[in-house]
């Protein structure tokens, strides 16, 4: 027979009761200001170690008890959607507050056009966070081959490179693109014309994972919060 509350002995009830109280105290501790990192989803994007949680996360609607209750109801199958606990997820709007880049060669809003329906479906190209997940401790979380979703028809009349773009694309060599081009076009640099001058896949992956930029350090548009000098101001 399955045990239920009524059939339990007094002692057992007390044990369960204390269990609940301890769990509640643990939960409350996690919600205390200054304890944010305890329940952060993981290490930050490399550039964001000094940014506050609420620069990206607006508080979730409703109060904490309500959120906890509805998530509990979701966990035991009473409702079919979980509420975001404490923080609502961040979107393009939050990113742009600090990362406005008017010369971006790939503005996410362009990808709302019908021609990008497949790319949206495949990987959500219209959202910053599809390529820059925040809590993985990396700079770029997407595969370097991401260019394949939109550049299958790219062809240059007078192709300046030693192996033409059409050949690279026919051979599905998508890992080469970032060897010569950055994605947002925000690094002040010459685009190489020889395959021998390309960055290696290892260099690109190292940069994605948080290493130094192999595209150089001069940016065309400076990240807004960097203009105020000292990073300590963040
Ligand atoms: C730069 C913006 C940014 C900052 C700063 C940030 N987050 Fe997030 N957070 C996100 C995004 C975007 C997501 C959605 C999942 C993802 O992209 O990794 C997220 C997801 C989450 C989640 C849900 C976890 C999941 O896997 O769905 C939690 C919890 C969270 N963040 C907590 C925090 C806490 C706590 C802090 C402060 C220590 C913080 N975040 C700071 C952007 C941010
Ligand atoms: C409160 C301001 C702020 C917000 C909000 C913010 N960022 Fe940042 N971000 C910064 C700063 C400052 C840096 C670090 C610049 C440096 O030191 O290189 C940075 C760095 C980065 C980097 C690494 C850049 C590099 O060259 O190392 C990426 C990628 C990035 N942010 C993407 C995002 C995305 C995506 C979002 C939205 C989920 C976001 N940021 C929200 C301020 C912000
Ligand atoms: C389709 C994938 C993709 C999307 C969408 C995307 N990025 Fe990136 N991002 C990249 C890649 C790849 C790099 C590394 C190459 C480079 O530096 O341009 C990068 C680099 C960066 C950098 C560092 C270089 C720089 O430009 O200063 C920042 C900051 C950044 N992204 C912010 C954003 C923000 C903010 C958004 C949304 C408005 C966004 N990204 C949308 C793929 C993406
Ligand atoms: C969601 C679609 C999409 C993705 C993904 C994408 N691009 Fe593009 N890209 C475009 C569009 C649209 C243009 C502008 C029209 C054109 O030149 O084809 C463009 C233009 C460019 C340009 C020329 C920009 C200029 O100002 O002359 C380069 C270089 C480029 N992309 C490289 C890349 C690289 C490298 C990747 C992969 C890291 C990539 N793109 C991924 C859609 C995309
Ligand atoms: C060896 C270096 C190199 C490689 C590899 C490379 N490109 Fe290029 N690409 C160039 C140069 C040089 C140009 C000429 C324009 C310039 O200077 O930006 C160019 C131009 C472009 C343009 C602009 C086309 C136009 O109409 O103006 C796009 C889009 C592009 N490349 C996408 C890609 C994609 C996608 C890949 C991967 C399949 C790729 N490139 C691989 C060097 C390279």
Image (spheres, helix red, strand yellow):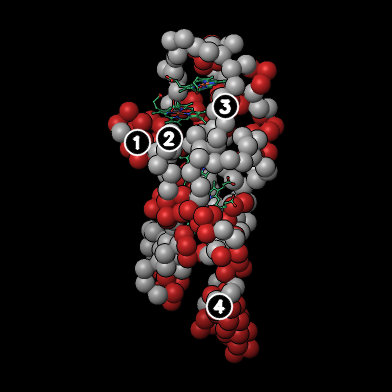
138 versus 22 height, above or below: above
Residue at mark 1: C-beta within 8 A of ligand 4:
yes
The label on residue 110 is 1
CA separation, marks 1 and 3?
A: 25 Å
Q: Is there any visible trace of residue 192 in the rendered image?
A: yes
Considering the image in quadrants, where does the C terminus appear? bottom right
Q: Nearer the viewer, mark 3 or mark 2?
A: 3
In terms of sequence position, does the residue under pointer 1 or pointer 3 come before the other? 1
Residue at mark 2: C-beta within 8 A of ligand 4:
yes
Q: In which quarter of the image is residue 209?
A: top right
Find numbered disc 3 in the image and state the secondary structure of the residue it sits on. loop
Query: Can you give x and y, in whole percent of width and height, for residue 165 in the image?
Result: 51, 15
Q: In which quarter of the image is residue 106?
A: top left
Q: Mark 4 points at which residue?
A: 32
Count of numbered circles in the view: 4
Horizontal side of 121 relative to 26 (left or right) equals left
Label 2 crowd (10 A; few <14 / some 14-19 / many >=20): few
Residue at mark 3: C-beta within 8 A of ligand 5:
yes
Q: Which of 20 and 193 is in front in this view?
A: 193
In terms of sequence position, does the residue under pointer 3 or pointer 4 come before the other? 4
The label on residue 106 is 2
Query: Can you give x and y, in whole percent of width and height, for residue 195 in the image?
Result: 63, 17
Label 3 crowd (10 A; few <14 / some 14-19 / many >=20): few
Find numbered disc 2 in the image and state the secondary structure of the residue it sits on. loop
Kindly indicate whether the residue at mark 2 contacts the one at mark 1 (C-beta within 8 angstroms): yes
Horizontal side of 57 relative to 20 (left or right) equals left
73 versus 81 height, above or below: below
């Amino acid at each position: 027979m399955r045990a239920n509350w009524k059939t339990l002995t007094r002692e057992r009830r007390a044990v369960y009761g204390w269990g609940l109280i301890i769990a509640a105290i643990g939960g409350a501790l996690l919600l205390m200001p200054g304890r944010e990192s305890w329940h952060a989803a993981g290490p930050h994007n490399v550039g964001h170690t000094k940014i506050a949680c609420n620069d990206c996360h607006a508080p979730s609607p409703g109060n904490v008890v309500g959120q906890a209750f509805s998530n509990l109801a979701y966990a035991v199958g009473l409702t079919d959607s979980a509420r975001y606990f404490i923080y609502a997820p961040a979107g393009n709007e939050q990113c742009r507050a600090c990362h406005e880049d008017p010369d971006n060669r790939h503005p996410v809003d362009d990808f709302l056009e019908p021609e990008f329906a497949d790319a949206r479906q495949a990987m959500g190209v219209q959202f910053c966070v599809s390529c820059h997940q925040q809590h993985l401790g990396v700079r770029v979380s997407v595969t370097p081959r991401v260019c394949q979703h939109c550049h299958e028809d790219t062809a240059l009349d007078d192709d300046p490179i030693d192996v033409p773009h059409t050949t690279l694309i026919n051979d599905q060599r998508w890992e080469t693109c970032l060897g010569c081009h950055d994605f947002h076009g925000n690094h002040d640099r010459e685009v190489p014309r020889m395959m021998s001058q390309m960055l290696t896949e290892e260099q690109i992956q190292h940069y994605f994972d948080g290493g130094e930029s192999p595209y150089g350090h001069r940016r065309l548009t400076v990240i807004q919060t960097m203009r105020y000098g000292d990073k300590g101001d963040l």
